[in-house]
Every structure is written in C-alpha cells, then in structure tokens.
Amino acid sequence: MPREHVAQVFSRQADACGRLGSPLYAALLARVARDVRDGGPCAGAVMGYEDSGHDAALPLRFMAAVHSLALTGRAPEVAAHFPSAGGEFDPGRPDAAWPALLAAVTAHPEWVADWLTRPPQTNEVGRAHLLVAGLLHSVPTAQRPIRLFELGSSAGLNLRAEQFRYSADDFAWGPVDSAVRLTGVWEGEVPDWLRAGAERHQALRIVERRGCDPAPIDPLSSDGALALRAYMWPDQVARMRRLDGALAIAAKVPATVEAAGAAEFLSAVELEPGTLTVVWHSVMQQYVAPEEWALVRGELDRLGRSATAEAGFVYVSFEPRAVDGEHAFWLALRDGAGPERLLARAQPHGLPARWPVARG
C-alpha cells in the first residue's frame, strides 16, 4: 500500500540518521513513520508523495519544514528540544519533541507543504577539507592561479574552501583566524602527499569561483540562510557552527553560482593558459539523471584532453561508490587526461577521512 511505502522510506532515514550521529532525528523519524502507518497528521502532510523513492529525500524535506518552524519562532515548543534553536536535547528521551512536532505539523500545513517541494541542500562544509586536500596534492607550483568550478554548488559555500582552517593531530593548514575551523579531519595517519602539498603551498591563489545548481541558494539572503540551517540536523551543533562560519566568510569572499545543470555549465568552461582549472563536486551525482551524467563525463573528458602544461586541468570528486564490492564515500582525483586515483575514504559528511585507502 502507498502509505506503507512512505513509512518505510521514513524508517530507513531514521536508521541512517542514527548511524550518522543524530539520535534526535532517528527517534523523531521513527515516530513519523509510525504515524504515517496509522494514518495520522504526518500521513496527511505527505499525501501526494506516495511514490517517492529514497533519492527524493522526502523525510529530510519534512524535517527541514519542522526545523524551519523552530528556527523562525513559529514552533517554540519544538525549538525547546532543538539545540540549534536554543533548546535542550535529552538523550534519555530522544523523542520528547514528538508531541510538539505533531502539533506544529497540524498547525502549519501550508508551510510544511511548501518545504516538501524543496530538495535538501545542506551544502555540507565538512566536505571542504577533501576539496582542499585534492587541490594541495595537485597544484604543481606555489601561487599557480586556480579557477575553481563546482557542480551542484547549492549556496557555493565550498567554493571558499581555502578560507577554512583544517587540523588533525600534528597537521594544520589554512588561515589561523578563519571563522570555520574543521578539526579531526583525518583519522589516524595524515597522508604524506597531503603534508607535501601543504608545505608546498602556504596558501592557494583562487582567481575565479563559479558553480552551478538547478536551484541555487543565496547564502547572503535571510531566506537562503534559513534554508541552509533548516536542512542541518538540530542536534549536530558542530555542523551548525561550521555553517554559521561559512556564511560569514561568504559575505566577504565573492563567488557566483549559476542556475544551470551540470552538463550545460561545463559545456561553457574552457581552459586558460597560465592557470589550473579545477572542477569539483561532492555527494551530488545521485541527484543527476544518468543521461545528463553521461554528458557531464563527456565534458570532463573534453577538458582533460585539452590540458597542457600551461593550461592545466584537475577533476576532484567526493561521492559514494562501490569499490571491490564495498560501498563507501571516496575522494578521487584525475589530472588532465590521466587515470583516476582514489586518495581517501571519508564519512558522508566528510569528517573524518582515512588514508591509506586499504581495501578488503
């Protein structure tokens, strides 16, 4: 039955949130799944989405609606349980916000319906250290001008990646006074190739920052900032702090995000002598139709074949993939038309990464 399908989608997301460190969302999404099965208010709220697959991220859209109600003061009873909105989360009663959530969904049906139309865009700042690791490894000489292009940019926060501070044990790189401080970015040994790149480059000279997204978010607008905050998970306060810092940096460091698909965007990119052109994306490929991704690969191949010593090209990605039968999130790099190399594995939100990439 359609309602059972939706309930299962919410149950699977509850399990995922539990594995990814959000006991609050794990508990609440489990209650939502039960309410959907029972035909309660949550079932009514998601009517029309009975055929949604996992990739539609319906549960995250639903919870973003609830979170935004808490963040804007429209649901103070929910906010009382959400640390992101100044509330307190009780690990002993992870679903304590459930009555307040149910009341908020019932009281604000149009608000919830609007948010259900919005695809989640967390623009996760924790993944930025993988971009920077790839850049430090691939930029051949100090002060080589870099043109940075990002696919699926959302608000373009990670187009400012070199403005963040990264640290792990005896390793650190980036401005010491950065508003974004990513700690514990590597689990165990920091790779030699990254240490060498960090020593070679005290800073990175990015001269162009451009991205694309089918529905870009303006991080400098109140609505845009609310959207980014609402897609965060309320009990993951460190992620929220990183987002706030990235929004502050975005206000100072310009970047452009165009409303365009990835293939269309890349078709207009050409290499320029005297620069290194970098194309990057993170955990967005699953939202692109296979036929469009085939066009993206064609454009990446075109750029790779065009690369020369004077006009370089590097392609960096952080995406889920199966390697030797094991599904994980991998940092991969391709220099020019050369072969792809797997550099590291990391958690879905980027922190921490692991190297070497031993498998099996």
Image (cartoon, rainbow, N blue to C red):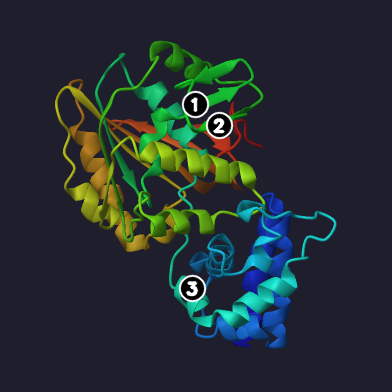
Residue visible at 67% across and 52% down in the picture: 83
Q: Is 154 on the left-hand or right-hand side of 309?
A: right
Label 2 amino acid? Leu
Amino acid residing under circle 1: Arg
User: Who comes first in sequence, dot 3 or dot 2?
Assistant: 3
The quarter of the rendered structure image containing the N terminus is: bottom right
Q: Which residue is mark 3?
A: 116
Q: Which residue is mark 2?
A: 182
Quadrant in which the C terminus is drawn: top right
Tag of residue 315:
none
- Do we see residue 222 in this rendering? yes
Q: What x and y, as percent, mark residue 252? A: 33, 35
Q: Which residue shows up at 40% across the image and 36% down it?
A: 249
Q: Say if mark 3 contacts mark 1, CB within 8 Å.
A: no
Relative placement, left or right, of 355 versus 333 is: right
Q: Are marks 1 and 2 in contact (CB under 8 Å)?
A: yes
Q: CA distance from mark 1 to mark 2?
A: 6 Å
